[in-house]
Image (tube, grey):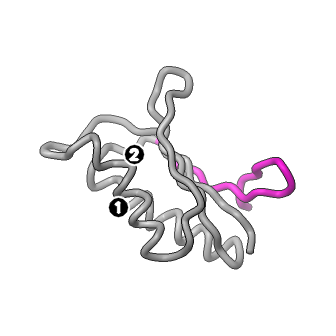
Amino acid sequence: MPSYRVRIVVGLMRAGADPAAVLPTAIEAGRDLTAVEHGQIEIAAGRPRLTVRYEAPDDLTAAGFGRAIVERVDELVDVEVSRVTRRWGSRWYPLR
């Protein structure tokens, strides 16, 4: 099954949200839909970026899974930018 990832540039926390809950919440949102391969938070260009890698049978389904993860994360933080990509070999390409 193809591998996809959604990357989310994280903005400000929502009132009352726990920063430690953001990554587990994103992973849980993905696991409610499919197998999650990996999740992490990193700093890229001085900004926090959350990545959830997951499986999906096709691009359309993967895009829907990505939206669901973003919507759940958006309940905790301001989502500034998100993007779903698909793995081909060792590279990641945006969905069309």
The magenta span reads: 81-96
Q: Quadrant of the C terminus?
A: bottom right
Q: Is residue 59 above or below residue 88?
A: below
What label sits on residue 37 in the rendered view? none
83 and 24: which one is in front? 24
**What is the spatial separation of the Cα atoms under label 1 and label 2, in whole angstroms?**
10 Å
Indicate the secondary structure of the residue bearing disc 2. strand
Q: CB of mark 1 within 8 Å of CB of mark 2?
A: no
Q: Residue at label 2? A: 79
Residue at (86% x, 55% y) in the render: 89
- Foreground mark, 1 or 2? 1
Indicate the secondary structure of the residue bearing disc 1. helix
Q: Quadrant of the N terminus?
A: bottom right
Q: Earlier in the sequence, mark 1 or mark 2?
A: 1
Left or right relative to 5: residue 8: left
Q: Position of residue 30 (x, y in %)?
A: 47, 67
Q: Residue farthest to the right?
A: 89
Residue at (76% x, 52% y) in the render: 93
Three-letter amino acid code of the residue under disc 1: Arg
Most common SS among magenta residues? strand
Residue at (27% x, 50% y) in the render: 76
Q: Position of residue 66 (x, y in %)?
A: 53, 63
Indicate whether residue 83 is drawn in magenta: yes
Q: Position of residue 72 (x, y in %)?
A: 35, 61
Q: Residue at label 1? A: 72
Three-letter amino acid code of the residue under disc 2: Val
